[in-house]
Amino acid sequence: MAKNAEIIAIGSELLTPDRVDTNSLIVTDHLNGLGVEVIQKLVIGDDRELLTEAIRTALSRVNIVVLIGGLGPTEDDVTRDAAAAALGRPLLLSAEQESILIKRFRSINRPMAQNNLRQAYLIEGAEALPNPNGTAPGQFLFTDHGAIALLPGPPRELRPMVEQQLVPRLLPVLPRQVIRVRTFRITGIGESDLDTLIAPVYSKYTNPTTTVLSSPGDLHVHLRARCETAEEAEALLREVGNPIAELLGDRVYSEKPDDTLDTVVARLLRQHHASVAVAESCTGGLLSGRLTDAAGSSDYFVAGYITYTETQKKQILGVPADILKNFSAVSEQVAAAMAEGAKRVGGATYGLATTGYAGPAGGTEFDPVGTVYIGIAGPGGTRVIRLRYGGDRYRTRTMGTQAALDLLRKTLQTAN
Amino acid sequence: MAKNAEIIAIGSELLTPDRVDTNSLIVTDHLNGLGVEVIQKLVIGDDRELLTEAIRTALSRVNIVVLIGGLGPTEDDVTRDAAAAALGRPLLLSAEQESILIKRFRSINRPMAQNNLRQAYLIEGAEALPNPNGTAPGQFLFTDHGAIALLPGPPRELRPMVEQQLVPRLLPVLPRQVIRVRTFRITGIGESDLDTLIAPVYSKYTNPTTTVLSSPGDLHVHLRARCETAEEAEALLREVGNPIAELLGDRVYSEKPDDTLDTVVARLLRQHHASVAVAESCTGGLLSGRLTDAAGSSDYFVAGYITYTETQKKQILGVPADILKNFSAVSEQVAAAMAEGAKRVGGATYGLATTGYAGPAGGTEFDPVGTVYIGIAGPGGTRVIRLRYGGDRYRTRTMGTQAALDLLRKTLQTAN
């Protein structure tokens, strides 16, 4: 049996603006673990015709079709009917399921409504999947070229049924395969520049597959190799991943999939027994916010000084008046003085500073809106970098914050 | 034109066990607002063939097809190609879009990679939807019996494009009905308490419909009336909305749908020609970050002092050592002294301070993890409030920030 699946989540409530389908994540996680790829997910209302059509299409396209929800006792619950129609098989009353239902209602001391009996009908040839947490049994059926499963929608019924009933039935019929993933977490390069750089390497391979995820200032490259053995998969990841790592150089801040730039910086600060004080202008608190996000950040974060006016830069950080006057508040010189001021006033190992034009107003010919200077002062001296972003205020603040964290990371990584 | 829609979200990352499609909620909300029902939602990977097939099926089934994502510059981004193929139309290079792209890259002073040009191709007959927040324009095209839209995936590009481009194009071609919405933007009450309070009012009505949207510390109640005339709709909104407004009192910070607590506070500060300086402990920069988020915030924001240690609280804010010693850094007295210190050191109209136990470690029997003191010092004197949150670090910091902004709002609203 091959390895493609489609998940169909059923329920009109899942088509409102307030609800997302999270059940499919549970199923996806387990299917991926079996080497099965989910190629499509569908959310569909309680509409029998539409659902029948969707199941029929899915059965013709993939090997494993998983239906979630719509197994309740009411007229709204159309999954059994639609699946039977799509398969061209009748629904048959299962005496065993009927007696399980009757017993269940007796055990909770409630009368069984007539419509509950709907839950005792199985598609001809289907096996019932026991549901210790609800009244609706699941159903499982091998088809000509795969399998179909009907699973209940409530997560506390769904999850155990996937783990204890669905996975054990699929495992023996799937080809043995191993999946290994290699992740690069990257900053300091844009998405299209990244792609231009590494596509010549990865595009020669269909295994591993390569995905690039992007959020402002942060890119993740995932290489996913599927092979018969772990050794083969790991060899493939080396073959494709090593040249990528080389091309990216120190723009890769981590290869650990759960790392963020924040956790990497925190780990480096702890490793170096170093502390940091921050002076912010254009980032307005975002940098301090990121540095204090993690539990225990008081171990290395001393203080942040958001000096939004020139007076405050002088008064709090001791930036010399003539530097402000000669070079303006957005300048290499002021970024350096702010970083040094933060280090001194905070009594910290490192002072980290941002000053720039977040916009939309402000800027000069030489330093237009979107320019950010980032200064770092530490045991190895003071250094300033200058960056230019696209001029959108949100982006300049977010990217400037990310770049400041990254400068701290690189400085720590090259420190003794 | 009739009223059924299908939404297709494109991106292999949306088929992993870690990601849900939330973009479709934004689109669903606006389509519902136009009286359009979403009958099916699909999530599909970066697979050109599969997507083409899905678009073709959708076009044959519904009137409005909305595609989200896959408009980036890389080979992975297949939405343009697939939509063109499904429609049987060519993609044509738009000279106008090309020059917009070139201009955008020039403005951010970056070379444009060759593959970025992919974003300048439009389906024959499609109108480009401007995207001020990114490089990928949307596309909109009337088909034989409806319309298709291609929208970018990043939410901050998607949302304005839906509101400002998609809705205005659909509105005139949909059957006339008048929809009026009344929105309450609320803080300082939890979702279930809110519902307990107002459900007795709204649950008697099916028109207007009532939706409650919730994010940490911020609730929106939307009443949506659909009638044949504006007068009828507005009368209904008064009938249901006025008693709700009364029950909520000053927890409603705005009835303007585009307001956030941040914009309301900024407006009040400007109206009062007031400035603010911030002293933060547990919120670690988030409060300053919120206050400096808007363009022009330097008109009222003077400085933020993120004093994470006791030494810094004394040194920067002049919090007396004996107060710290007698009452500890997380106390009513220290919150007051921090607020007064921020006001004085910043030379601002108001000083606003937070101190608390964000956790997971720390806390005392009287002030467990999740306790936040918020102090405000202003022309009318100093005031401190004490709040207790559920103990999760992220939530305590976010909710504490929101509560501090809200205390500033209420103080400004009752000031002369």
Image (cartoon, coloured by chain):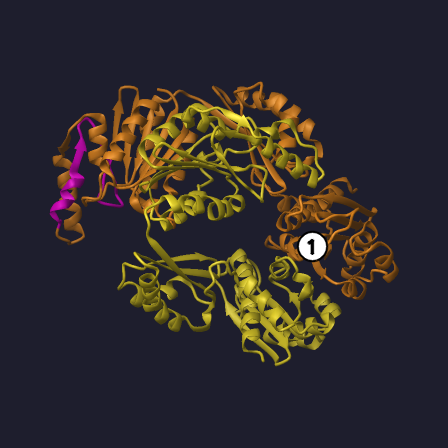
Chain colours: A orange, B yellow
As drawn, A291 above or below A31: below
Membership of B1 in magenta stretch: no
Start and end of the magenta stretch?
A112-139
Q: Is residue A159 visible?
A: yes
Quadrant hosting residue B73? top right
Q: Position of residue B274 (x, y in %)?
A: 65, 72
- Relative depth, front residue between B396 and B184: B184
As drawn, A108 above or below B291: above
> Crowding near pointer 1: few (<14 within 10 Å), some, many (20+)?
few
Position of A285 with respect to B20 (left or right) is right
Q: Position of residue A170 (x, y in %)?
A: 33, 27
What residue sits 46% from the left and 26% below the top? B84
What residue sits 17% from the left and 50% below the top? A107
* Chain letter for mark 1: A
Quadrant hosting residue A88? top left
Position of A365 with respect to A189 (left or right) is right
Secondary structure at numbered mark 1 = loop
Q: Is residue A271 visible?
A: no
Q: Position of residue B76 (x, y in %)?
A: 53, 28
- Relative depth, front residue between A132 and B82: B82
Q: Position of residue B151 (x, y in %)?
A: 48, 38
Position of A294 with respect to A114 (left or right) is right
**Residue that mark 1 sits on:** A361
Position of A275 with respect to A325 (left or right) is left
Quadrant of the image containing the N terminus of chain B: top left
Quadrant of the image containing the C terminus of chain B: bottom right
